[in-house]
Amino acid sequence: MAKSDANQLAKSSPIRAWAINHLRTLIASLGAMTRQPAASLMTVAVIAIALALPAGMFVLLNNASHVSVGWDNSAQISVFLKSKVSEKQAKKLMGKLRLYDDINNVSLINKSQALDEFKEISGFGGAIEALGGNPLPHVLTVEPKIDANRPDKIRHLLKRLNQQKQVELAQLDLQWVKRLFAMLDIAQRAIWVIASLLGIAVLLVVGNTIRLDIQNRREEIEVTKLIGGTNAFIRRPFLYTGLWYGIGGGLLAWLLTSLSIGLLDNSVTHLASLYNSGFQVQGLSFSEGMSMIGFSCFLGLGGSWIAVGKHLSEIEPS
Amino acid sequence: MIHFDNICKRYPGGHEALSNVSFHLPRGEMAYLTGHSGAGKSTLLKLIALIERPSRGNLVLDGINLSSVGNNKVPYIRRNIGIIFQNHHLLYDRTVFDNVALPLIIAGFQHREIGSRVRAALDQVGLLNKEKSAPITLSGGEQQRVGIARAIVHKPGLLLADEPTGNLDPELSKEIMELFARFNDVGVTVLIASHDLDLIKQMGSAVISLNQGEVSRNDLARGELADG
């Protein structure tokens, strides 16, 4: 009709109107949340705690594997030479091993040096002197090049070392590192399970909050439908509210995680200094923090989407 | 503008609110819908506003057969109708201005445009000085006028009012009815459900009467139109 054609002219272009509507709703929904600060903050805090918990565990696990990777790299092969091998022969073997390309470095602990060290550390000095001779063999410590992708390489090196005629025994004790990695793997899976469960909890918390919000604004929804608001228009503020909950929850979770790590940091540094290690706890990196916020937004939006889909269609003007 | 063609409306439970209602309200006309309570006035308005759907018959609004309109098209049809309720249906958590602006926001008007149109609408109902008030602080008559301003702010082609003077004293009622007549003067089609027969007689527009779901009087059909 002629009147509404005239109306169309005064209206913004559809895309502009759409963008204006979205921006308006985005800001309005944040405004609505700040008008009920206590309720909004509680929801945000629940989301934050639910996210910070697995995030904190993830950080600890990450640090644990950093530490153990350090141990893994320092893995050494102890090559015990036969007792009749002289120091000169040992040095010759050392020179030969240094040419292997899967060996980083070789050093020699000659038997008298080893004996002195043993006497000093063990306190069995007297007993050893009573033995008369030096029962210890020369030992070569071999630092292999570790290729994490090729665990069989180091086994191959071990085999070759054992085949040398001067060698009594070459041994690499990586078993405990393997066990540690297996445990870390289990821990990681456990964190994923916990994170998934808490993620579902966040989804439900947001969904329930939005559901209550929808019930409280029943009258507004009815009136809006009566004066021509589309379902998309009515849905929008609730979805944006969910998004804001997600953003707020993610930011607070980041803050909580950083604070908790900060509290641990001093004690860990102290412990590390006792081990003569410069190890420091690493918190969430920027990209990890951002992806946590992204995940949180996804959960917030998802939760509100579920609530809106389920409850909005029930409200019709009568 | 509005064509009712043998419309029946039966509610779940068997109550037949309208039976074989036929009338035609041409564009630019104004008519009163009267009848006792329970005669089907509200149901008739609800059918036009697509709040209810007819059980039988054809209902054509502005050339569109409402029986075949899908749910997703309903909002766009409602945007060309201004609806006024007896109990105002205002939103009490926002100002008068924001209440009146709602239809414009839904339609995606620009900010500046919204300001001038809302003020023009409030001016027409004589509430320009109340734009920042909370609706709850206004009298019943003022709240009803806010509802009217909201119904006309987006310049719809059709105004529907359901007992708009139900809670008002006679003098205020007359003012409100005269307001509707002024909108009709500028070309808006108006249909008002009311049981206030004295007032309607004073106003002198066409009357459609319903009695137990059937049309008992139709001035429009008899061609006895007062000047629209």
Image (tube, rainbow, N blue to C red):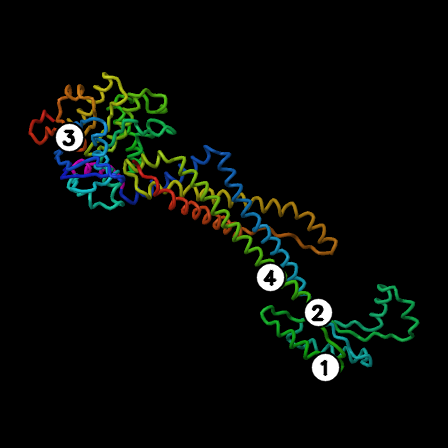
Given contact means CB atoms under 8 Å apart, are the residues at marks 3 and 4 in contact?
no
Q: Amino acid at mark 3?
A: Gly
Residue for badge 2: A173
Mark nearer the viewer, 1 or 4 = 4
For the residues marked 3 and 4, what is the alpha-carbon distance in whole angstroms? 76 Å
The chain letter under disc 1 is A
Position of residue A205 measured from the top left corner of the image (x, y, whole percent): 48, 44
Q: Secondary structure at mark 1?
A: loop
Q: Amino acid at mark 2?
A: Asp
Given contact means CB atoms under 8 Å apart, are the residues at marks 4 and 2 in contact?
no
Which callout, 4 or 2, points at the residue further toward the start of the chain?
Answer: 2
Position of residue A156 measured from the top left corner of the image (x, y, whole percent): 64, 77
- Quadrant location, the N terminus of chain A: top left
For the residues marked 4 and 2, what is the alpha-carbon distance in whole angstroms? 20 Å
Residue for badge 3: B187
Left/right placement of residue B51 relative to residue A289 reads: left
Q: In the rendered image, is residue B30 in sight? A: no
Q: Residue at x 68, y 76 (%)?
A: A158
Left/right placement of residue B157 relative to residue A283 reads: left
Q: Amino acid at mark 4?
A: Asp
Mark nearer the viewer, 2 or 1 = 2
Q: Residue at x 60, y 60 (%)?
A: A186
Residue for badge 1: A164
- Stretch of the chain drawn in magenta: A1-12
Tell me, for residue A185, which label it has, or none: 4
Q: Secondary structure at mark 4?
A: helix
Left/right placement of residue A152 relative to residue B53 reads: right
